[in-house]
Amino acid sequence: MYKQILTACTLSGALLFHSCSAPASKQEIDIIPQPKSIETHTGHFAVKNNQTIGYADAKLEPAARYLQELLARGTGYTVNVAEGKGDISLSVTADQGIPGAYTLEVTPKEVRITGNTYGGVISGIETVRQLLPPAIENAANAGRNTEWSIPAVSIADAPRFEWRGFMLDVSHHFYTKEEVKQVLDLMALYKLNKFHWHLTDDQGWRIEIKRYPLLTEKGAWRTFNKHDRGCMELAATQDNPDYLLPESKLKIMEGDTLYGGFYTQEDIKEIVAYAAQRGIDVLPEIDMPGHFLAAVTHYSHVSCSDKPGWGKMFSSPVCPGKDEALEFCKNVYSEVFGLFPYEYVHLGADEVEKTNWKKCPDCQKRMRQHGLKDENELQAWFVKDMEKFFNAHGKRLIGWDEILDGGLSPTATIMWWRNWAGDAVPKATAQGNHAIITPNFTLYFDAQQDKKTLRNVYDYEPVPEGLDEKQKSCILGAQANVWCEWIPSFERMQYMTMPRIMALSEICWVEPSSKNWENFRDKMVAHLPRLEEMGVNYRIPDLEGFHSTNAFIGEGTVEVSCIAPGIRIHYTTDGSVPTEQSALYTGPIKVTETTDFTFRSFRPNGKKGDMVKTRYVKSEMAPATEAPAAEDGLKAVWHEYRGSSCKEIESAPVNGEYIVPDVRIPEEVKGNIGLVLTGYFDAPADSVYTFALLSDDGSLLYIDNELIVDNDGPHSPREVIGQKALAKGLHPVKILYFDYNGGKLQMQAADINGVTTPFPASCFKH
């Protein structure tokens, strides 16, 4: 029997890859994000009944009340708050530096938190919170005979970036006031301090504007759209009620079932105050001039025609040629400004369908009046006109990176999201503009997850290479975005964001040289019981020990594990969805025939994890191919292709042919990409080989004309791993790949745990 091993090619023969890192030792204190400096001492501070939280400045009273609430909820104790010194003391120093820095001193006698700002004090409070037992998070534990103690420590800490953001889209699917507060609680716990609230889009208007009541009376409600129907289908096919539309967000109107909801202005004020107490600034976004269908449908005089709808790609935008349209936009923002005290406001200005502007006499007249050469410059004119209005009201404008098109004002800030627009951050920062880093390929938390996702977030470096020191100083920080087309419930939203928020907090807080993946992974696992106490529907860490396709010769062994404690794994072999009544995995399973498994993990409370399908294929060594002398590398053919499946690429017109050293996109290939790579894989020895194919969007891997990895379909970066038993020698290989905006493609060797290593160039021949 051949053991499943990883073999990669070298000029001299076979090289075996094994994981060489020893398991990280368990940290006694698990704080996320990792503090800059921490010293542990002997003893602990015991939290007792009738202790006092003292604050040195009246501005810190909200922070003291916040800590009072945290302590009283879990312990059931009476906790007093008073100005002056207390058993726990809060103060602010005049120290400069990035806002959010703090020191924490815990002795058996007292706790002292000193911040360089109000936010710094909150950061210290969150560290104290994490030093307390997880049970502190749950009011059900109040009154139990639990020893509540904080280990004696000295911590000096400061964030790397001032902007540590999280965006929630409440337009595509709506989240209630109480649900938003729970989001803010999680943000605070992990020291995130900027809440970007995407309040309007084509699919729903979520904020009350008193001057224009139809925006919420009509624009906040819709009949089911394709995403609603798609989510309900997923709920059925995946046996996952988290995909169902909550009944509380449905209503019957004139015989139709409508989905929606909105926030009154009083709701907005309440949430903003709730965030402020936790050291979080709230950044509102009213997206315009595009993504404005929920407004122009009910106030059609602000669009270019009286029949707004959908263009080729996006919806009808605002008409920047009409003065009454500009007045409408500014009237909306006038009310918004009064609700949000934070200086920054997000205009949106992304994905604008400009077809109407080309035909609109008002838009063309505006362009002639201001000497604008095209519709990109018309959009830039609109953004700059709105920015002047913002500035006149004491606000600063942020927009998605499309605001660079047609020219950027000196004072605007971009949010970079388009990974294919790689020059956006260098270009903006070279002009002295600030930038916030929020790339869709890593920090869009609505993207489906796999075993690489959390590591990819943790390893992400927000500051692009090649920037000079002045440009680097223009990077405000990083932010994760959650677009909710496919996230209809609060439970599903939590599942998509936790524990990714933990990794986000570390890339925003910790210097790259101080990051350690193994330590973080252990801390993340240690935090899962805290999330259990908080009632958070976190995503169970991926099951490990197998690939998408697993080859064996003679007899194979199925071994499955999960790093999370208390997880039960159920499985089926007939293709059905595993339930808690399905077979329970209790240890290694022997297989002697090709077998398909579907595994699913379950938390102690019965909540389901993702389903994972894997195939164990009984194999014989595929014989090598007789081929003429071959050169290193693969042949790449670029097809002009814009489809959604790899299987149709080769019918598209050819743009060019290239030679590449390994599996990659040739530098010359841009735009609509249908790529076909062909050649040979040179196996140096008889063995079972493991191939990890990563792509954004779809890809397929064939070896010896057999499909080994199926990573097809539109998706964000995703790695799929497969195996095949190969005899020594050349084996025909074919990789198909598609993408629309210069995505990502690579293939690596993988060990049994999915740790990937690049194939040496000599592995590939053509």
Image: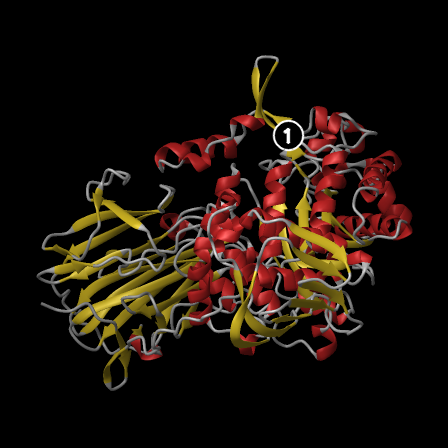
Apparent side of residue 153 relative to residue 395 in the rendered image (left or right): left
Image coordinates of residue 728 in percent, x first then y, are: 17, 74
The kind of residue tagged 1 is: Gly
Foreground residue, 596 or 46? 46
Apparent side of residue 547 relative to residue 341 in the rendered image (left or right): left
Q: Quadrant of residue 318?
A: top right
Q: Quadrant of residue 112?
A: bottom right
The residue identified by callout 1 is 261
Label 1 Cα neighbours within 10 Å, binned few <14 / some 14-19 / many ≥20: many
Name the residue at the bottom extreme. 12
Apparent side of residue 556 relative to residue 638 in the rendered image (left or right): left
- Let me know if residue 420 appears in the view: no
Image coordinates of residue 105 in percent, x first then y, are: 63, 72
Foreground residue, 621 or 521? 521
Name the residue at the top extreme. 255
Image coordinates of residue 5 in percent, x first then y, are: 21, 71
Image coordinates of residue 642 in percent, x first then y, are: 49, 49
Quarter in which the N terminus is drawn: bottom left
Residue shown at 40%/61% (left/top)? 694
Q: Secondary structure at mark 1?
A: loop
Q: From what the image shows, is residue 330 above or below residue 82?
A: above
Apparent side of residue 649 relative to residue 418 in the rendered image (left or right): left
Q: Quadrant of residue 269?
A: top right
